[in-house]
């Protein structure tokens, strides 16, 4: 596909109609036009289309990309559907921006990246923490410092199929591949290494067959930095924070605020939701700009493959999945 003219609005298709899909609609408002929304529930899909003034809706992505050609497709559907939908969009000649996870195995992720490269298309992944202002401030504070230790927590309650907005879902989330995909990626960036040893333990798999809800992960880089990561969908008190220690500074990122041993650097946001929305706007703008120029976006598909391989090694360490580290 010819890259969109820098003067033209990018024509976008959207797969999914949940809370994150709505954030993408807002983020793309000044950058492109949403031409269609796709998903299996006609009532929810049509309500979403009407609310956001999207002119067309389809029951699946195959019908959408066949009938209504667009420059790019944003995938904001349940995690298990991502890989197949990304492949459908790429095969139809569209650039793709996919929510985390890109796939549920490293092997699938490698296949999709190679497919995009072979077709000359952009494949972006919504590693939104790469655009999250507090973590970017923390990275700046640690620039030139040798990070030796990272402690990260991402804890929430998702025993039932309810999303972060409190709305019921028709699908089950996976703490390792979803939130773990965000956190492990951020931790490895602080460590400054994609060459890491992995040790992991996990809580028992629920009797109902859903994914494990609790993980403890330790990473060690080739230069000796270590990281401890706690992931949970079982905690009744939510927490999401990072403590990053270098030879010179220790930086704390918590609740959108940043501080060092010398005191506050970035105050907590008045509205955390607005901070998240701003990160998504920056991310989606980076994706669109990558279509108009000759540079890759910060979170392009190839750049997240090391994270995908580590996630799979964690799954293997706790007895789940098959390693694709050799892919």
Image (cartoon, rainbow, N blue to C red):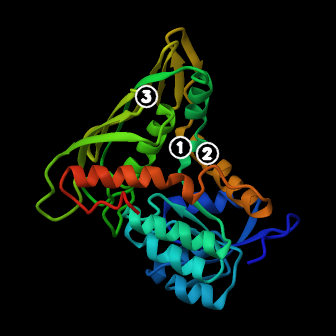
Residue sitting nearer the eye, 283 or 87: 87
Q: Position of residue 90 (x, y in %)?
A: 59, 77
Residue under numbered circle 2: 279
Do the residues bearing badges 1 and 3 touch, measured as CB atoms within 8 Å? no
- Residue 238 found in image quarter: top left
Residue under numbered circle 3: 223
For this view, does 127 lie left or right of residue 203? right
* Residue 87 versus residue 188 in the image, above or below: below
Q: Judging from the image, what secondary structure is the residue with disc 1 in?
A: helix
Kindly identify the residue that appears in the image at 52 percent across and 59 percent down: 20
- Residue 235 found in image quarter: top left
Kindly identify the residue that appears in the image at 71 percent across and 75 percent down: 71
For this view, does 83 lie left or right of residue 122? left
Q: Judging from the image, what secondary structure is the residue with disc 3 in?
A: loop
Q: Judging from the image, what secondary structure is the residue with disc 2 in?
A: helix
Give the class, few, some or many, for how many residues have Cα within 10 Å of label 2's Cα (few <14, many ≥20).
some
Q: Where the C terminus falls, by quadrant?
A: bottom left
Give the class, few, some or many, for how many residues have Cα within 10 Å of label 3's Cα (few <14, many ≥20).
some
Q: Earlier in the sequence, mark 1 or mark 2?
A: 1
Do the residues bearing badges 3 and 2 touch, measured as CB atoms within 8 Å? no
* Residue 308 versus residue 256 in the image, above or below: below
Q: Position of residue 2 (x, y in %)?
A: 78, 76
Do the residues bearing badges 1 and 2 touch, measured as CB atoms within 8 Å? yes
**Could you tell me how far apart the alpha carbons at marks 3 and 2 are, in whole angstroms?**
31 Å
Residue sitting nearer the eye, 161 or 93: 93
For this view, does 150 lie left or right of residue 296? left
Residue under numbered circle 1: 129
Query: Can residue 150 be seen in this snapshot?
Result: no
Q: Earlier in the sequence, mark 1 or mark 3?
A: 1
Extreme-right residue of the structure: 7
């Amino acid at each position: 596909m010819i890259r969109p003219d820098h003067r033209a609005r990018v024509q976008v298709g959207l797969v999914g109609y949940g809370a994150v899909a709505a954030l993408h609609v807002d983020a793309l408002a000044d950058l492109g036009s949403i031409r269609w929304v796709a998903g299996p529930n006609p009532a929810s899909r049509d309500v979403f289309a009407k609310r956001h003034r999207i002119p067309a809706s389809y029951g699946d992505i195959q019908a959408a990309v066949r009938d209504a050609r667009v420059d790019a497709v944003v995938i904001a559907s349940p995690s298990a559907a991502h890989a197949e939908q990304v492949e459908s969009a790429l095969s139809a000649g569209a650039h793709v921006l996919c929510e985390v996870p890109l796939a549920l195995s490293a092997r699938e992720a490698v296949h999709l990246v190679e497919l995009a490269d072979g077709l000359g298309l952009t494949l972006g992944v919504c590693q939104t923490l790469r655009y999250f202002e507090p973590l970017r401030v923390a990275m700046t504070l640690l620039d030139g410092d040798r990070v030796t230790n990272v402690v990260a927590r991402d804890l929430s309650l998702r025993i039932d199929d309810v999303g972060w907005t409190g709305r019921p879902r028709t699908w089950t989330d996976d703490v390792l591949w979803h939130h773990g995909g965000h956190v492990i990626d951020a931790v490895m960036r602080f460590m400054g290494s994609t060459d890491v040893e992995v040790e992991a333990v996990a809580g028992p798999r629920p009797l109902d067959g859903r994914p494990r809800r609790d993980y403890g992960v330790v990473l060690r880089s080739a230069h000796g930095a270590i990281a401890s990561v706690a992931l949970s969908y079982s905690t009744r008190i939510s927490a999401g924070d990072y403590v990053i220690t270098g030879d010179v500074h220790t930086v704390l990122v918590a609740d959108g605020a940043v501080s060092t041993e010398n005191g506050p650097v970035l105050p907590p946001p008045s509205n955390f939701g607005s901070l998240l929305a701003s990160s998504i706007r920056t991310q989606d703008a980076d994706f669109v700009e990558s279509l108009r120029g000759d540079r890759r976006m910060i979170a392009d598909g190839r750049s997240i493959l090391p994270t995908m391989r580590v996630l799979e090694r964690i799954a293997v360490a706790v007895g789940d999945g098959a390693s694709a580290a050799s892919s």
